[in-house]
Image: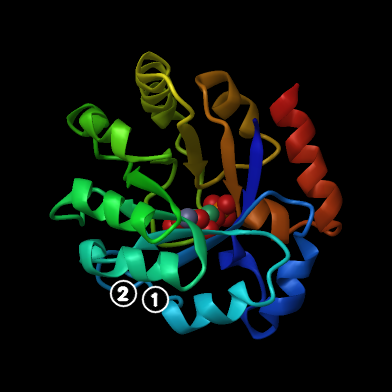
């Protein structure tokens, strides 16, 4: 199933409750957690995830761009993340981390930065529910889509198909009306979009436009 996960990184942080209400027709609310170490930007942490979980009309898709996810990832599941994604570049024991996310009741996922190949991590597929292929360098919204990552999306889709089961393939960064088609064509099925959604005059119609383009 094709799913849209708007990133609240592009929302008004002073009004997160109403900003979440604006994306209630989406499948997930993508929550970018940045620690100022793994990426050169700092956003929000556990208390804010807990607070927005209480008011969000849709489940939270937490994307952890932090160091030591082995320690923190399960706590994001406990705080209300229905899906928790950690970066393999930061994890010491990705198998244990994925298992601890699932044990806390959430879907587990791992992410790869643009410069990180997927193949060395293919063995993790039995441990996860989703793989996130970054289509920008993590850290900031509003960057240009990296079309050269589509080869990796294809590779992940093929590995997931060979593996069987229901593992989703997510893309994040620069996904818009102009770029979503290539992502679908490469095999992605969960689309994160920050500026393309929150930058629209009519947010719900932008979400349905992205959905229609993904299904086309
Ligand atoms: C980037 C974040 C993305 C970001 C996407 O580090 O992981 O989720 O919000 O924003 P856009 O869609 O504007 O590229
Ligand atoms: Zn993200």
Classify mark 1: helix, strand or loop.
Answer: loop
Where residue 59 sits in the image (x, y, percent)? 62, 59
Q: Residue at label 1?
A: 42
Q: Which quarter of the figure has residue 43?
A: bottom left
Classify mark 2: helix, strand or loop.
Answer: loop
The residue under the point 83% across, 53% down is: 204
Q: Residue at label 2?
A: 36
Q: How is the image coloured?
A: rainbow
Q: Which quarter of the figure has residue 97?
A: bottom left
Can the viewer see residue 158 in this picture? yes
The one nearer the camera, 25 or 40, is 25
Q: Indicate whether 180 appears above or below 61.
A: above
Q: Quadrant of the C terminus?
A: top right
For ligand 1, tell me if the residue under mark 1 lies within 8 Å. Answer: no
Q: Quadrant of the N terminus?
A: top right
Say whether marks 1 and 2 touch (CB < 8 Å): yes
The residue under the point 79% across, 31% down is: 212
If you read the primary sequence from the N terminus, does the residue marked by circle 1 or circle 2 appear first?
A: 2
Q: Is residue 57 left or right of residue 68?
A: right
The residue under the point 47% across, 84% down is: 47
Where residue 177 sits in the image (x, y, percent)? 71, 38
Q: Indicate whether 8 appears above or below 173.
A: below
Q: Is residue 52 left or right of residue 177?
A: left
The one nearer the camera, 15 or 78, is 78
Q: How many marks?
A: 2
The residue under the point 71% across, 78% down is: 17
Which mark, residue 6?
none
């Amino acid at each position: 199933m094709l799913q849209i996960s708007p990133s609240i990184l592009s929302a008004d942080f002073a009004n997160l409750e109403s900003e979440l209400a604006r994306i209630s027709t989406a499948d997930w609310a993508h929550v970018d957690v940045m620690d100022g170490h793994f990426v050169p930007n700092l956003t929000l942490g556990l208390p804010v995830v807990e607070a927005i979980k209480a008011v969000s009309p849709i489940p939270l898709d937490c994307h952890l761009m932090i160091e030591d996810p082995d320690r923190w990832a399960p706590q994001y599941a406990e705080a209300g993340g229905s899906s928790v994604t950690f970066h393999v570049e930061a994890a010491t024991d990705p198998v244990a981390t994925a298992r601890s996310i699932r044990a806390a009741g959430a879907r587990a996922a791992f992410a790869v930065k643009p410069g990180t190949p997927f193949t060395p991590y293919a063995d993790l597929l039995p441990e996860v529910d989703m793989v996130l292929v970054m289509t920008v360098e993590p850290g900031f919204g509003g960057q240009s889509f990296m079309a050269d990552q589509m080869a990796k999306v294809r590779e992940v889709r093929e590995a997931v198909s060979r593996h069987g089961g229901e593992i989703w393939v997510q893309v994040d960064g620069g996904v818009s009306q102009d770029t979503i088609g290539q992502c679908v064509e490469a095999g992605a099925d969960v689309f994160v979009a920050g500026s393309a959604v929150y930058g629209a005059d009519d947010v719900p119609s932008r979400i349905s436009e992205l959905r229609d383009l993904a299904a086309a």
